[in-house]
C-alpha cells in the first residue's frame, strides 16, 4: 500500500516535471513563433520592397530595351550612310588622282612658262632701257611742242576764220561721233540786245540752230584762260537771246589741263588733240 502511494507520488512528480518542461517548451516555442512572426513581417516588407524594385527594374529594362532597339536602328542607318560615304570617298579618290595628274601637267606647263617669262623679262628690261632713253627725247620734244603751240596759238588768233573752218574739217569725224555735222556750222554775228553781257556789243559766233538747241562751236588752236572766259560769256548770252538751251563744243589742237577740267564742269564738250600740263609750260617759260 505504501509502495503504491510512493509510486503514485513519484509518478505525479514526473508528470509535473514533464508538464513544466512542456510548458517551458511551449513558452519557448511561443517566443520563437513571435520572433519568427516579426521576421516574417520584416521579410514580407522586404519582399514587398523587392517586388517594387523588381517592377522598377523591369520597367527600366523595358525602356532600356526600347533604347537598345532604337540605337540598333540608328546604327543600321549609320551603316548604310557609311557605305554610301565609302562609295563617295572611292569616287573622290579617283577624281583626286585625275586632278593630281592634271596638276602635274600644269606644273610642267608652268615651269615652261616660267622659263619663257624669264626670257621675256630680260627682253622687257632691254626695252625699258630703250624706252627710258626715248622718253627723255620725247620729254624734250614735248617741251618744244608746248612752246610752239603757244606761238601757233598767237598766230591762229590773227589767221582769221579760214583756219577755224579748216580745223572743223580736220575734226569732222570726231564731231560726227557727237552727232554734229560740221557742214551746217555757219559763222555769224550776234548782238547783245538784252544787256546780258554788254548791251549793243557784237559777238562773232560759229553755230547752227535746231528746234531744240543752239549748237555753238569755239574753234581754237590753243585754249588758255582767255578762251575759257569767251566760252563762259557765250554760255551765258546765247540761251538768253535765242530762248533755247545751248550746247557748246570746243574744238582745239591744244588745251590747258585746268581749262579742260573747268569747262567740262560747265557742260562743254571738248574735242582736243593734246592736253597741256600747265606746270610743264611754266617750267619752260
Image (spheres, rainbow, N blue to C red):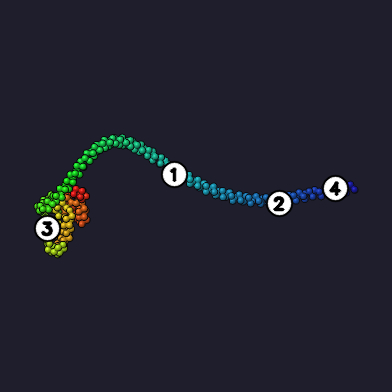
116 shown above or below 192: above
Residue under label 2: 34
Earlier along the polypeptide chain: callout 1 or callout 2?
A: 2
The answer to whether one can see residue 153 in this image is: yes
Q: Secondary structure at mark 4?
A: helix
Q: Which residue is mark 4?
A: 10
Closest to the observer: 266 or 212? 266
Crowdedness of circle 1 by 10 Å Cα count: few (<14), some, many (20+)? few
Categorize mark 2 by other alpha carbons within 10 Å: few (<14), some (14-19), many (20+): few
Camera-near label (3 vs 2) is 3
* Residue at the outermost front position: 285
Is 123 located above or below residue 172 in the figure?
Answer: above
Q: Pointer 1: what residue? A: 77
- Residue at 10% x, 58% y is 188
Mark 2–mark 4 distance (CA, rounded to whole Å): 35 Å
**Cα distance between the residues tagged 3 and 2:** 145 Å
4 or 1: mark nearer the eye: 1
Q: CA distance from mark 1 to mark 3?
A: 94 Å
The residue at the point 38 percent across, 40 percent down is: 88
Count of marks overlaid on the render = 4
Picture disc at residue 14: none
Q: Is residue 89 left or right of residue 127?
A: right
Sooner in the amino-acid sequence: mark 3 or mark 2? 2
Compared across the picture, whether 112 is left or right of 283 comes to right
Amino acid at each position: 500500500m505504501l509502495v503504491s502511494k510512493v509510486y503514485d507520488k513519484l509518478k505525479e512528480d514526473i508528470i509535473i516535471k514533464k508538464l513544466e518542461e512542456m510548458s517551458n517548451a511551449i513558452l519557448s516555442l511561443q517566443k520563437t513563433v513571435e520572433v519568427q512572426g516579426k521576421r516574417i513581417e520584416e521579410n514580407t516588407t522586404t519582399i514587398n520592397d523587392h517586388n517594387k524594385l523588381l517592377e522598377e527594374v523591369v520597367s527600366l529594362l523595358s525602356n532600356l530595351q526600347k533604347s537598345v532597339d532604337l540605337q540598333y536602328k540608328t546604327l543600321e542607318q549609320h551603316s548604310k550612310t557609311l557605305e554610301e560615304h565609302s562609295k563617295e570617298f572611292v569616287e573622290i579618290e579617283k577624281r583626286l588622282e585625275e586632278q593630281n595628274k592634271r596638276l602635274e601637267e600644269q606644273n610642267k606647263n608652268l615651269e615652261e612658262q616660267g622659263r619663257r617669262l624669264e626670257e621675256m623679262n630680260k627682253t622687257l628690261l632691254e626695252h625699258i632701257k630703250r624706252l627710258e632713253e626715248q622718253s627723255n627725247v620725247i620729254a624734250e620734244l614735248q617741251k618744244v611742242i608746248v612752246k610752239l603751240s603757244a606761238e601757233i596759238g598767237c598766230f591762229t588768233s590773227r589767221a582769221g576764220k579760214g583756219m577755224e573752218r579748216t580745223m572743223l574739217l580736220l575734226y569732222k569725224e570726231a564731231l560726227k561721233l557727237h552727232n554734229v555735222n560740221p557742214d551746217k556750222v555757219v559763222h555769224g554775228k550776234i548782238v547783245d540786245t538784252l544787256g546780258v553781257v554788254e548791251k549793243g556789243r557784237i559777238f562773232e559766233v560759229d553755230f547752227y540752230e535746231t528746234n531744240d538747241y543752239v549748237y555753238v562751236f569755239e574753234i581754237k588752236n590753243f585754249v588758255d584762260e582767255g578762251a575759257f572766259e569767251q566760252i563762259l560769256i557765250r554760255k551765258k548770252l546765247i540761251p538768253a537771246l535765242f530762248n533755247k538751251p545751248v550746247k557748246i563744243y570746243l574744238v582745239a589742237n591744244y588745251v590747258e589741263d585746268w581749262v579742260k577740267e573747268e569747262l567740262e564742269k560747265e557742260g562743254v564738250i571738248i574735242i582736243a588733240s593734246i592736253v597741256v600740263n600747265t606746270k610743264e609750260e611754266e617750267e619752260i617759260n
